Amino acid sequence: MTTATLFTRIMNKEIPAEILYEDDLCIVINDIAPQAPVHMLVIPRQPIPRLADACQADRELLGHLMWVVGEVARLYDIEDAFRLVVNNGADAGQTVFHLHLHILANKGSDETFSEATL
């Protein structure tokens, strides 16, 4: 039996989190250790450990996640400047092995993103 990930436990309401957006396929929450003034996570309800583990049957879900990024960016007024990050594997910085997309933005900051950020 596979142990539920932190994100599965959040979706099952076992761990509290402020859900910023949700639909039948995913949720969006704030990152608990933000790396930017705005740092949200887009998490599919279907547990896929890493992006590299996605299969052809996951194509529609992956496209939906990208669409949700745009929707959330518009909802939170960051559509003009945000970064999207997906860590794939421990050596890339992935700490929760349930696919998730990081949306990072410097909303309200005088700083701009540089290639060195993250």
Image: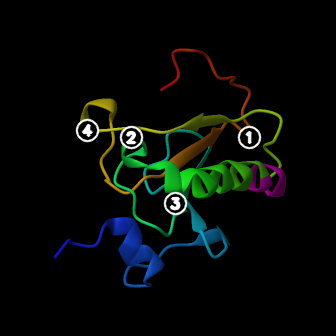
What element does badge 1 sit on?
loop
Instruction: Please tell me how crowded label 2 is: few (under 14), some (14-19), or many (20+) other residues with Cα within 10 Å.
Output: few
Tell me the quarter of the picture where residue 113 sits. Answer: top right
Residue drawn at 39 percent across, 40 percent down: 52
Depth check: 24 or 58 in front?
A: 58
Instruction: Nearest to the eye among marks 2 and 4: give it.
Output: 2
Residue picked out by circle 3: 43
Does the segment drawn in magenta span residue 108?
no
Q: In terms of sequence position, does the residue under pointer 4 or pointer 1 come before the other?
A: 4
Instruction: Specify the farthest residue to the bottom.
Output: 13
Q: Cβ–Cβ below 8 Å for labels 4 and 3?
A: no
**Residue type at the position of mark 4:** Ala
Residue picked out by circle 2: 52
Instruction: Please tell me how crowded label 4 is: few (under 14), some (14-19), or many (20+) other residues with Cα within 10 Å.
Output: few
Q: Is residue 31 left or right of residue 3?
A: right
Q: In terms of sequence position, does the residue under pointer 2 or pointer 3 come before the other?
A: 3
Report x, y in % for residue 92: 33, 31
